[in-house]
Image (tube, rainbow, N blue to C red):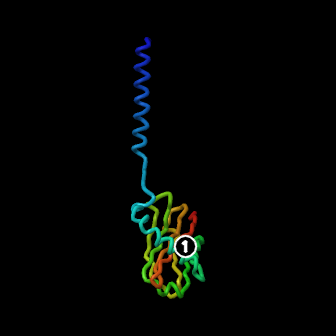
Amino acid sequence: MSWGTRIIIAYILGVIFILYFVIRSMMLNTELVEENYYDKELSFNTHIEGVNNANKMMNPIKVIANSAIIGIIIDSSVSSSIVKGAIRFYNPASQKSDKNYQLTSSVSGNYFFDKSKFDRGKYIVQVSFEFQQKPYYTEQSIFIK
């Protein structure tokens, strides 16, 4: 085998090697963490204000999880006057596993969710609502087995 043939074979193998990695990289799932992260960046000051308001609450928001349910407990004096709110179960590993619920006013302040409807893994429970025209926001991590 001559040097010319070896060079051509090495060149062809190099091109095949590069094409293999280009095709593999095109097949990877590259979903974004947040879909509208530019819009969320613009409302970041409201987010910070919500975190500060939630930290100042006399009875902080609690997230509990046992073998069957996930519970969110908000002080009843606050939860009975919630104007609008949302509970988001954010799964950092998969956007398909995220769950969103509307937070409505409740006399008891207890919100329960069936754990069997969630995929296994880590979730960040994000609770946001408006009370007395002020934003409130808190988040806590849970792990579902």
Q: Position of residue 109 (x, y in %)?
A: 53, 83
Q: Is residue 84 left or right of residue 59?
A: left
Q: Is residue 6 left or right of residue 77?
A: left
**Residue at figure coordinates x 47%, y 85% from the top left:** 132
Q: Position of residue 54 (x, y in %)?
A: 55, 77
**Residue at figure coordinates x 42%, y 21% from the top left:** 9
**Residue at figure coordinates x 42%, y 54% from the top left:** 31
- Image-quadrant location for residue 62: bottom right
**Label 1's element?**
strand
Say which quadrant the N terminus sits in.
top left
Q: Is 113 or 23 nearer to us in this picture?
A: 23
Q: Is residue 27 visible?
A: yes
Q: Is residue 113 visible?
A: no
Count the labels in the image: 1
Q: Is 114 or 14 nearer to us in this picture?
A: 14
- Image-quadrant location for residue 103: bottom left
* Residue type highlighted by circle 1: Ile
Q: Position of residue 93 (x, y in %)?
A: 50, 57
Q: Vertical placement of 115 versus 84: above or below? A: above
Q: Which residue position holds label 1?
A: 70
Task: Tell me the crowding category of disc 1: few under 14, some 14 to 19, or many 20 or more residues within 10 angstroms, Cα based.
Answer: some
- Image-quadrant location for residue 34: bottom left
